[in-house]
Image (cartoon, rainbow, N blue to C red):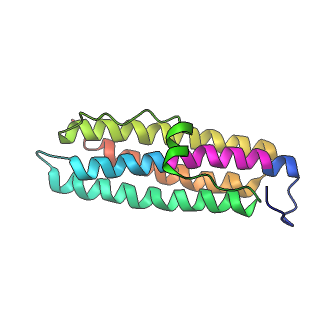
Amino acid sequence: MYATRNDLSHNVRREMGDLLNARLADAVVLASHAKQAHWNVRGPGFTGLHALFDQVHAEVGTYVDDIAERAVALGVPAVGTVEAAAEASVIAPYPRDANGGEAHVDALAGSLATFARESRAAIETADRAGDAVTADLFTGVVKGADKLLWMVEAHQG
């Protein structure tokens, strides 16, 4: 951990750092899933889905940055490499054979749902630890992830 004058206890900062890095891994993986869908979507609805998947990627990118910066603010190194994210994320791997719009919508919706669920649980964990700022961060993340999930699921048949 880095030296900091942050008044949260060392133990709380370490616990929140672990939590933040776990969700950072999920956010990095989710961002890559959105780009995978964006690059490879085909078929009816291509234009709308191509743009939507890019929007998901952009918004998740802000979560990546916010989560990583909160960890560092608490004196904990952010671990956001692709290798570390792939190892630590609880989000299922993206199906390599996804091709049509429905397949990408289904795959990305699943990734978003897992990310939202894990981030929602992080709110409670941060609250119990007494870190209202981290809880607030994840409240905003969940609000955005729920909206993105709704937008992606709206394309399901």
Q: How many marks?
A: 0
Residue 93 coordinates in the image, percent (x, y): 40, 34
Residue 103 image-quadrant placement: top left
In which image quadrant can residue 129 be found? top right
Where's residue 123, x and y in %?
66, 45
**On the picture, is 2 further left or further right than 78?**
right
Q: Farthest left residue?
A: 44
Which residue is rendered at x = 30% and y = 36% of the image? 106
| Viewer can see residue 150 | yes
In the image, which residues are magenta? 14-27
Most distant residue in the bottom direction: 5
- Residue 16 shown in magenta: yes
**Residue at (53% x, 57% y) in the render:** 64
Q: Is residue 80 magenta?
A: no
The location of residue 40, given as percent across then percent down, is: 22, 47
- Relative side of 125 to 141, left or right: right
Quarter of the rendering occupied by the N terminus:
bottom right
Q: Residue 136: where, in percent of width, then height?
A: 66, 56
Q: Main secondary structure of the magenta part?
A: helix
Q: Is residue 75 above or below residue 138?
A: below
Q: Residue at x 65, y 49 (%)?
A: 20
Q: Is residue 156 visible?
A: no
Position of 91 relative to 33 (above/below)? above
The C terminus sits in image quarter: top left
Q: Would residue 92 appear left or right of 85 to someone viewing this image?
A: left
Rendered residue at 46%/55% (across/down): 60
Q: From the viewer's perspective, is residue 126 above or below residue 6?
A: above
